[in-house]
């Protein structure tokens, strides 16, 4: 089916929006804030933690940041009113204006950090493509100093991530380690599956050995099994790590087992009006998803 799935993805720009909508139903909580909160409540009832994300990125005018800012403020307000919900939030800096003006983006981020501080809410700054990696890390340092209950993301496929991790160790940063999803050149990123896996494991072990907090964010069962065994053999305490996955990714058996064993497992829960772009990207990243969607579509 692999060739067929790739063909479907290549024809995606011609596909009716209803087809992409089938993807959206799997990978996003819904369009509204209420949809997101209900999804988190359902996940919590099954033993999972959550991270809520308002969909959207790469905003290029200041007025365009008003909607995500309003939604994030409403989200933080609702979480303050529902303290039993076990979730944090994540933000993309280009959604707050990083591509427009760094000080403008910092002003928006600082407002959200102030709201988060009021309810002691954890906020993670997401990582985007390599054009903003340095800016994102610089902004994170500023945010972490202002509000320490802030985390960051590193992408294992980038050559620079090992040095970035060493620097973040000094800050005692909470790192979410993922493989990386953006198309990057061989000059700055590992390209082969095994090379990326090797670097992921290397970075994961390095941060765990340093006694720092690591969020193991991957859907690759090889990486989960490898680091899970390493954690057990090294007797690394539960308070130092968690596992993370995207909503809708079909690895429920692994995740359920981890939860049943008492490990922290966090599900990334996106919601909002920008579902089309997000779902299209999910398909491009993983063409095998097309096969699942085709089957569901014709049932």
Image (cartoon, rainbow, N blue to C red):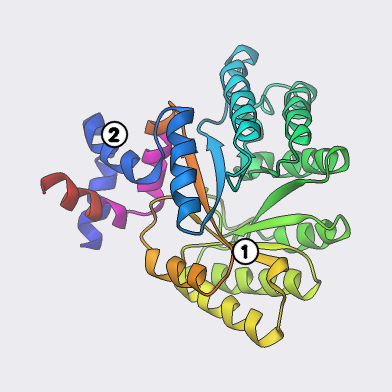
Q: Which residue is mark 2?
A: 13
Task: Say if residue 15 shows up in the picture.
Answer: no
Location of residue 95 by image quarter: top right
Image quadrant where residue 25 sits: top left
Q: Earlier in the sequence, mark 2 or mark 1?
A: 2
What mark, if any, has residue 83 been given in the picture?
A: none
Crowd tier of the residue under label 1, counting other residues whose Cα lies within 10 Å: few below 14, some 14–19, many 20 or above: some
Pointers 2 and 1 in contact (CB under 8 A)? no
The percent position of residue 189, horizontal first and vertical second, equals 60, 58
Which span of residues is magenta-colored? 277-290
Q: Residue furthest top?
A: 63
Q: Secondary structure at mark 2?
A: helix
Q: Residue at x 59, y 48 (%)?
A: 86
Instruction: State left or right for residue 8 relative to residue 229.
Output: left
**Magenta region, mostly helix, strand or loop?**
helix
Q: Position of residue 37 (x, y in %)?
A: 49, 37
Is 109 drawn above or below residue 168 in the view shown?
above
Q: Is residue 68 above or below residue 152?
A: above
Q: Quadrant of the N terminus?
A: bottom left
Q: Residue at x 62, y 31 (%)?
A: 81
Is 62 in front, or is 45? 45
Q: Position of residue 293 (x, y in %)?
A: 23, 49
**Residue under label 1:** 242
């Amino acid at each position: 089916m692999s060739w067929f799935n790739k063909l479907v993805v290549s024809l995606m720009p011609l596909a009716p929006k209803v087809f992409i909508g089938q993807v959206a139903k799997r990978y996003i909580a819904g369009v509204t804030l209420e949809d997101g909160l209900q999804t988190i409540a359902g996940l919590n009832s099954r033993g999972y933690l959550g991270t809520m994300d308002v969909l959207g990125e790469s905003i290029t005018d200041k007025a365009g940041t008003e909607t995500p800012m309003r939604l994030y403020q409403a989200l933080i307000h609702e979480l303050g009113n529902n303290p039993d919900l076990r979730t944090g939030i994540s933000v993309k800096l280009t959604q707050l204006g990083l591509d427009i003006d760094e000080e403008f983006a910092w002003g928006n981020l600082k407002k959200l950090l102030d709201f988060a501080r009021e309810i002691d809410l954890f906020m993670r700054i997401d990582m985007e493509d390599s054009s903003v990696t340095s800016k994102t890390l610089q902004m994170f340092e500023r945010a972490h100093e202002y509000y320490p209950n802030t985390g960051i993301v590193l992408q294992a496929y980038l050559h620079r991530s090992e040095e970035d991790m060493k620097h973040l160790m000094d800050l005692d940063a909470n790192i979410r380690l993922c493989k990386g999803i953006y198309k990057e050149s061989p000059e700055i990123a590992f390209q082969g599956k095994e090379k990326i896996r090797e670097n992921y494991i290397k970075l994961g072990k390095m941060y765990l050995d340093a006694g720092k907090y690591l969020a193991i964010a991957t859907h690759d069962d090889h990486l989960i099994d490898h680091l899970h065994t390493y954690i057990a053999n090294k007797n690394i305490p539960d308070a130092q790590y968690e596992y993370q996955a995207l909503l809708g990714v079909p690895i429920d058996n692994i995740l359920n087992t981890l939860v049943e064993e008492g490990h922290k497992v966090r599900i990334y829960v996106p919601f909002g009006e920008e579902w089309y772009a997000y779902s299209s990207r999910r398909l491009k990243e993983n063409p095998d998803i097309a096969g699942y969607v085709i089957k569901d579509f014709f049932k």
